[in-house]
Image (tube, rainbow, N blue to C red):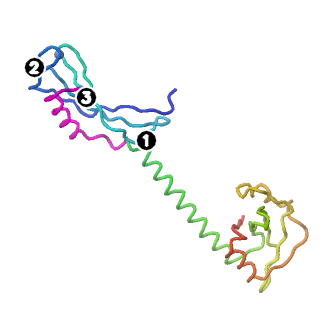
Amino acid sequence: MIIYGSKAVHLKSEQSKTSICPNCDTQGSLVLSVYRKHAHIFWTPLFPLGKKGMSHCQHCQEVVEAKKLQEPIKGEYEALKNEAKGPLWQFAGLALIAVFISFISIESGKNEKLKVQYFSSPQIGDRYHYKDDIGSYSTLIITSISHDSIFFSPNEYVINKVSQIYKIDKPENYSEMSFGLSKLNVKKMIDSGDIFNVKRD
Ligand SMILES: [Zn+2]
């Protein structure tokens, strides 16, 4: 099983009426062919890698690679190569990657909007992700909200990797105690990035 590599797609062939085979001296026996290679991975073409080609004598069967062709056959081959267009599907992988990247950026834009919305209208049960002074991460859960303050129960666990913070965000990890912070202070912590994420079920 080949997972990645390159493949060549036939683009165009043309019989040369005037040229003479350098091997058997037959006139009009040469067929010029142009191919375009593309890189592929998991059976998906990624992007083109350039054209290659050859001449094939229908009389003596000799095949000469494009780079070894002599004038004037070489000139004929170059002309054919220039007018041979490769298929768009050879770019399929690049197109897929572009779609994937724009999907990711749309999704992260949505998340960013949701975050701003949740921070501006806190609800009981929201969990705030924060960074502590020594570079560890943990969470707080909102237990009540008053006119000017938000009350939180702290998570009793901390974790070193921000990407694993979801592992400690479990109901049984939250302390029975709670403490209040003024809404102004909470906003400052959000603006400074000490509180950097919010989750709502
Ligand atoms: Zn020949």
Distance from label 1 to label 2 (Cα)?
40 Å
Whole-percent x and y of residue 48? 36, 40
Q: Earlier in the sequence, mark 3 or mark 2?
A: 2
Distance from label 3 to label 2 (Cα)?
19 Å
Distance from label 3 to label 1 (Cα)?
24 Å
**Image height check: is 58 above or below 174?**
above
**Image height check: is 67 above or below 194?**
above
Q: Which mark is residue 46?
A: 1
Q: Which mark is residue 66?
A: 3
For the residues bearing labels 3 and 1, Cβ distance under 8 angstroms: no
Residue displayed at 84% across by 64% down: 155
Amino acid on which the number 2 mark rests in the picture: Gln
Q: Which mark is residue 27?
A: 2
Residues in magenta?
66-89
Q: Earlier in the sequence, mark 3 or mark 1?
A: 1
Q: Quadrant of the C terminus?
A: bottom right
Amino acid on which the number 3 mark rests in the picture: Ala
Q: Does mark 1's beta carbon lie closer than 8 Å to ligand 1?
A: no
Residue displayed at 44% across by 36% down: 40
- Element type where label 3 sits in the image: helix
Disc nearest the viewer among 1 and 2: 2
Q: Is residue 174 magenta?
A: no
Q: Which mark is residue 100?
A: none
Whole-percent x and y of residue 104? 54, 57
Whole-percent x and y of residue 145? 79, 79
Amino acid on which the number 1 mark rests in the picture: Leu
Residue displayed at 87% across by 73% down: 178
- Element type where label 2 sits in the image: loop
Whole-percent x and y of residue 1? 52, 26
Within 10 Å of the Cα at label 3, are there few (<14), some (14-19), or many (20+) other Cα atoms?
many
Q: Is residue 85 magenta?
A: yes
